[in-house]
Image (spheres, grey):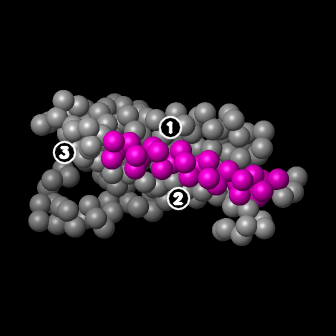
Amino acid sequence: GCNEDQGVHGLINNVGINIRETALDQTKEEYHRIMSTNIDSTYFLCKLFHPLLLKAATASAQSSACVVNVASCAGLMSSGTGAAYGMSKAAMISLTKSLSCEWAKSRIRVNAVAPWMTMTPMLEDAVKNNPGALDKVKEWTPMQRLASAQEVADPVVFLCMPCSSYITGQCLAIDGGLSAQGFDGPCVTP
């Protein structure tokens, strides 16, 4: 919650856009839009919220605050999403690690999650006329299915809870085993 007197106990940076192009075909404008949305917003929101997170973290000897950045498996390895998107999410993971070290003494934990393909209402709508479009994604994933939105949200909640009070600077892949196996699909195609 947010109460300026008590501070903010948690900040979730859940943002992302992609314009799927090869590095050679990506325009300068598309590149800057991806970077501005995916990493600049996360960086500047963390800076903006730091005073409120600090207030919550120092309210008592047992207090802490946290940031959870929602990155992507594309930030861990090439996953066919294009270079600009992948590097924006890799930058988010790097920012997570840097801020976790900078802010740990202030009892502000900073972690990230890296989801793989997730069945959201937007994705359901996108494939409603061709449900087989996701068959290859399921084949590439060791668990042979996509995550539900709840399966991505639950680890984010965990990272905000007191039971994760000694976890900082980590990136938790929520990927059905994909990052353990390695991506077996195609690179982005023009």
The amino acid type of the residue labelled 3 equals: Lys
**Does 41 lie within the magenta span?**
yes
Residue 82 image offset from top left, x and y in percent: 26, 37
* Residue at 14 percent of width and 55 percent of height: 132
Magenta stretch, main secondary structure class = helix
Residue 28 image offset from top left, x and y in percent: 26, 38
User: Which sits in the foreground, 33 or 118?
Assistant: 33
**Left or right: 140, with 173 as reference point:** left
User: Quadrant of residue 121 in the image?
Assistant: bottom left
Are circles 3 and 1 on residues that touch, CB within 8 Å?
no
Q: Residues within 10 Å of mark 2 (few under 14, many from 20)?
A: few
Are circles 3 and 2 on residues that touch, CB within 8 Å?
no
Q: SS class of the residue under badge 3? A: helix
Question: What number is the disc on residue 154?
Answer: 2
Q: How many angstroms separate mark 3 from mark 2 (CA)?
A: 26 Å
* Residue at 43 percent of width and 54 percent of height: 15
**Does 175 lie within the magenta span?**
no
Residue 84 image offset from top left, x and y in percent: 31, 37
Position of residue 79 relative to residue 61, above or below, is above
Question: What number is the disc on residue 93?
Answer: 1
* Residue at 72 percent of width and 53 percent of height: 51
Q: Earlier in the sequence, mark 3 or mark 2?
A: 3
User: Which sits in the foreground, 42 or 109?
Assistant: 42
Q: Residues within 10 Å of mark 3 (few under 14, many from 20)?
A: few
Residue range corresponding to the magenta coloring: 32-58
**Quadrant (top left, top right, bottom left, bottom right) of the C terminus:** top left
Q: How many angstroms separate mark 3 from mark 1 (CA)?
A: 27 Å
Q: How many angstroms separate mark 1 from mark 2 (CA)?
A: 19 Å
